[in-house]
Image (cartoon, helix red, strand yellow):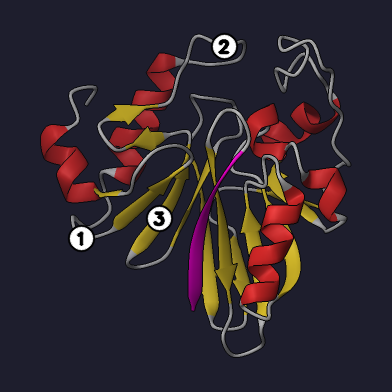
């Protein structure tokens, strides 16, 4: 498996390229901006992009959806965020944005496979109603749910601190300590590190 992190856009979003070495195709997680940078990374690894997964529907995570022209996966509770500038917060920035609609609506527990890659979509509402984490046995892409030393904001419309902390405590803290987390912003960490040292928990 090929895994590469790109930091894209003015909000410094972590976009992840997750590539299958067996079939030379890739999943793009949270292409928030800079589609040409994403395309260059795919070319560097000789990977053909297969589809996009948005961990949630905020503008900084969906901004390059249209420019990549790929199938889009998102949790069903955030599907309307793609088409609504008020919900996806682009209205707040003064540049209303509408993404293409989702091609596949995800639910808690759905499996997403590509070659040897297999991800479980874990529904973690709180930052948005349809926030998800994408996990395997040894790694988890946590979007804006859990960060190294922090948690996602809940002061935006449709956010809920109670739901966010409940999602983290009941779902993410149930994972093994050695699971590496790859968040939507900032550096990586592990579940064990956050269990011990994350002050928000």
Residue that mark 3 sits on: 140
Please give the residue where the numbered disc 2 appears in the rendered image. Answer: 156
Q: Is residue 48 left or right of residue 12?
A: right
Q: Dot 1: what SS?
A: loop
| Magenta stretch prevailing secondary structure | strand
Image location (x, y in percent) of residue 32 = 67, 40
Rendered view: 190 above or below 85:
below
Q: Does residue 106 appear in the picture of this structure?
A: yes
Which residues are the magenta region?
1-8
Query: Residue, x 51% and y 30% (percent of image)?
Result: 125
Q: What crowding class fits label 3: few (fewer than 14 Cα within 10 Å), some (14-19), or many (20 or more)?
A: many
Circles 3 and 2: CB atoms closer than 8 Å:
no
Q: Residue at x 11, y 38 (%)?
A: 196
Residue in the image at 61% along x and 83% along y? 115
Vertically, is 1 above or below 49? below
Look at the numbered discs 1 and 3 and tell me whether their residues touch, using CB distance below 8 Å.
Answer: no
């Amino acid at each position: 498996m090929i895994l590469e992190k790109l930091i894209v856009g003015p909000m410094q979003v972590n976009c992840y390229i997750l590539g299958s070495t067996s079939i030379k195709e890739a999943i793009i997680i949270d292409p928030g901006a800079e589609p040409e940078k994403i395309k260059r990374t795919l070319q560097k690894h000789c990977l053909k992009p297969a589809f996009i997964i948005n961990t949630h529907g905020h503008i900084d995570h969906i901004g390059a959806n249209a420019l990549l022209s790929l199938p889009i996966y998102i949790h069903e509770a955030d599907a309307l965020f793609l088409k609504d500038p008020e919900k996806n917060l682009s209205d707040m920035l003064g540049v209303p944005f509408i993404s293409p609609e989702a091609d596949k609506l995800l639910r808690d527990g759905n499996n997403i496979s590509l070659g040897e890659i297999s991800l479980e979509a874990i529904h973690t509402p709180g930052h948005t109603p349809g926030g998800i984490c994408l996990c395997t046995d040894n790694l988890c892409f946590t979007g804006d749910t859990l960060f190294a030393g922090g948690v996602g904001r809940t002061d935006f419309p449709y956010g809920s601190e109670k739901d966010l902390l409940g999602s983290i405590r009941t779902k993410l803290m149930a994972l093994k300590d050695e699971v590496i987390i790859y968040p939507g912003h900032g550096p990586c960490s592990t579940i064990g590190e956050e269990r011990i040292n994350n002050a928000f928990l």
